Amino acid sequence: MKIKVSKTDVWVAAMDDRPGGLAELLEVLADAGANLEFIISRRAPEKPGKGVVFVTPIKGVRQVKAAQAAGFKKTGSLHSLRIEGEDQPGVGAKMTTLLARAGINLRGLSAAAFGRRFVCHLALDTAAAAAKAVKALKSIK
């Protein structure tokens, strides 16, 4: 099975936990021309009334300025990989088994299949772990 693995920057912003809180942030990015491939949003239980949103990609000066003005910051503590390939039964198990055998502890994983393709985003704690994951994933069959 052929997969494509690439590093990607993740941007994060705090948001109000209320109707429209997320929409307001995403509208700013859309108005700047951002074509987001990945969005995760959740409440922040440790901060009642607040939430957090993670997005990627933010590209170009216009999008970066808009993201920063809306409160987004490129996260330096989360190292992310984007994996894309042909969807087939067990692909998630294959990837996570290879990573486990390489001694890589995942911070997070999000994946979806669409048609005959899948896309997966891995979150890792360090750049070294991300580089090690790239190497491990290249051995997938």
Image: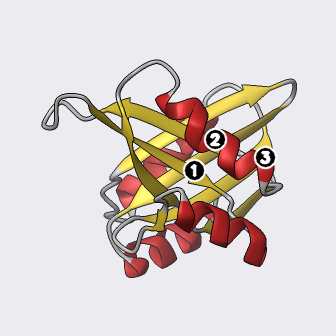
Is the residue 135 above or below the residue 98 in the image?
below
- Regarding residue 141, the answer to whether it shows in the image is no
- Decide: few, some or many residues near mark 1? Use Cα within 10 Å; few <14, some 14-19, many ≥20: many
Quarter where residue 57 is shown: bottom right
Is the residue 80 above or below the residue 112 in the image?
below
Of 27 and 138, the residue lying toward us: 27
Q: Residue reaching furthest right?
A: 115
Type of residue at label 3?
Gly
Q: Which numbered dot is residue 26?
A: 2
Type of residue at label 1?
Val
Which of labels 2 and 3 is toward the front?
2
Alpha carbon separation for disc pair 2 and 1: 9 Å
Question: What secondary structure is marked by label 3?
Answer: strand
Q: Residue at x 52, y 24 (%)?
A: 20
Alpha carbon separation for disc pair 2 and 3: 27 Å
Q: Which numbered dot is residue 78?
A: none
Marks 2 and 1: CB-CB under 8 Å?
A: yes
| Relative image position of residue 130 (x, y in whole percent) | 47, 71
| Relative image position of residue 62 (x, y in whole percent) | 76, 71
Q: Which residue is mark 1?
A: 55
Q: Which numbered dot is residue 85?
A: 3
Which of labels 1 and 3 is toward the front?
1
Which of labels 2 and 1 is toward the front?
2
